[in-house]
Amino acid sequence: MDYWNNYGVHPFSPFWNRWYYGDRIFIVEPLFWFCLLPLVFQVARSAWWRALCLGLGVFMLGLVWSGIFAPTIVSLAVTLFALLLVYFQKRFSLSPWVSITGVISILVLFGKYSHDSHSRLENYLRAMAPQADVIQLSAGPAPSNPFCWQFSALTIENQKDYVGRT
């Protein structure tokens, strides 16, 4: 799953140190946790594990609603998404397809807006500095929000100056 964030992985190290990254999701994406927690809760055999899952879910919702990471509308959407996953996991007891479908939906949604955001940023950089050569773009979405992105761009301008922009 580390491939999908902007930190990525280098699976061929020490032979080849190239990093691979997807620029698709926040590094610790809460939506993935909300996809997996209902299934883990259902398969948990002990009350201790169920309490841990429930506590983690409540803690994460508290963080989402704290306003630190997301605006109210995103917090509401995340809460509804989590409740929907709990409902479907309970309805289709012990089926991993609820979690799998949730994770795939998140990847598709974030992937679409990542692609759109990259295209808009490249167009913006071309308009702002047409002579610049883009060396690297790194993107990171806000937690649970595919509509809010932070970018870092490294360019070479005038064939000699490295310029970093966020």
Image (tube, helix red, strand yellow):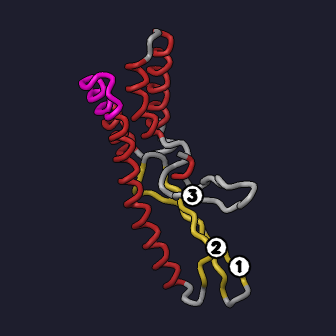
The answer to whether the residue labelled 2 contacts the one labelled 1, judged by CB atoms less than 8 Å apart, is: yes
Tell me the residue that label 1 is attached to: 162
State if disc 3 and disc 1 touch (CB < 8 Å): no
Residue 96 drawn in magenta: yes
Main SS of residues in magenta: helix
Q: Secondary structure at mark 2?
A: strand
Answer above or below: position of 67 versus 153.
above
Residue 26 position within the rendered picture, expressed as x and y whole percent measured from the top left: 51, 49
Q: Position of residue 51 (x, y in %)?
A: 47, 14
3D distance between C-alphas at marks 1 and 3: 22 Å
Residue assigned mark 3: 21
Outermost residue, front side: 15
First in sequence, mark 3 or 2: give its number. 3
Dot 1 surroundings within 10 Å: few (below 14), some, or many (20 or more)? Answer: some
Which residue lies at the image location 43% right of the left edge and 66% below the top edge? 117
Q: Earlier in the sequence, mark 1 or mark 3?
A: 3
Q: Please give the range of residues in magenta.
A: 83-97
Q: CA distance from mark 2 to mark 1?
A: 7 Å
Residue 154, placed above or below residue 141: below
Q: Disc number at residue 128?
A: none
What residue is disc 2 on? Answer: 154
Q: Residue at x 62, y 52 (%)?
A: 9
Which of the two residues, 42 or 95, is positioned nearer the viewer here? 95
- Dot 3: element: loop
Looking at the image, which residue is at 46% across and 79% down?
123
Amino acid found under the numbered disc labelled 3: Tyr
Between the C-alphas of marks 3 and 2, the distance is 16 Å
Q: Name the amino acid, label 2.
A: Leu
